[in-house]
Image (cartoon, helix red, strand yellow):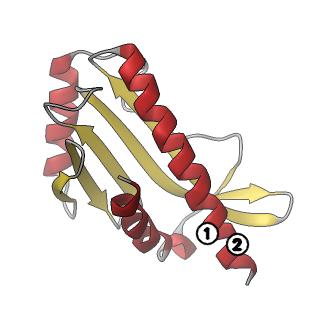
Amino acid sequence: MQTFLRPALYLVLLGLCALPSANADDSLPARYPTLQISEVQWTAYRDEVRALPGVDCKDGRAYQFICNSSEQHTIWTFTREGHHAHPAVSRAVIVMQQTDKGPAPGIDRSSHYAGNRGAFDDWVKDFASLDKAQVAQWRATQRK
C-alpha cells in the first residue's frame, strides 16, 4: 500500500500552493459523525465519491479501491471484499497547516468502518504511520 499511495500523495502536494492554510487543531468534518457506519452508508459513500467530477478510481493492492481527486487534494481508500477491515473507508486530505515555523503540509484523515472494529483499528494505524512518514518527507523537502 505504501508504494502506491506515496506517488499519488506527492502529485497532490504539487497543488498545495493553492490550498488555504488551517490551524493544526482544525480538522475537516468526516463524512459521517461516527466511526461505525452501516454497509449501506459505506456503499453510498463509495458511489458518491466515484460519481464526483474529476475523480480517478482504480483497484489498488491488498484488496483496496483507491479514488484520487487532484482538484480536491483528496484520496479515498475503500476496502474490497477479502480485506481484513472490509467494509471500511479512509479519506486523506492534503492541507497546509500553520505551525510555529510557518505553513507546512499535513494530512487530515477521517475513516469509517462497517465491519470488524479491531481490523479497522489496525488498518487506520497503518495509515497513521504512512501519513507521518509522508508529512516528514514533504517537510524535509520544503526545508531544502
| Residue at point 65%, 41% (across, down) | 26
Q: Nearer the viewer, residue 5 or 74?
A: 5
Where does residue 107 sit, x and y in percent of width and height? 55, 52
Label 2 residue SS: helix
| Residue at point 45%, 24% (across, down) | 121
| Residue at point 56%, 45% (across, down) | 129
Q: For residue 138, which numbered disc appears in the image?
A: 1
Residue with the mark numbered 2: 140
Where does residue 83 sit, x and y in percent of width and height? 22, 32
Is residue 30 in view?
Answer: no
| Whether label 2 touches label 1, CB < 8 Å | yes
Label 1 residue SS: helix
Where does residue 87 sit, x and y in percent of width and height? 23, 26
Identify the amino acid type marked 2.
Answer: Ala
Is residue 50 in view?
Answer: yes
Q: For residue 45, which numbered disc appears in the image?
A: none
Q: Quadrant of residue 73?
A: bottom left
Instruction: Report the residue that reaches farthest toward the bottom.
Output: 144
Mark 1 crowdedness (10 Å alpha carbons): few <14, some 14-19, many ≥20: some
Q: Nearer the viewer, residue 125 or 35?
A: 125
In the displayed structure, does residue 119 sit left or right of residue 18? left
When the figure is inspected, residue 121 is found, relative to residue 71, above or below; the finding is above
Figure quadrant of the C terminus: bottom right
Mark 2 crowdedness (10 Å alpha carbons): few <14, some 14-19, many ≥20: few
Q: Quadrant of residue 47?
A: top left
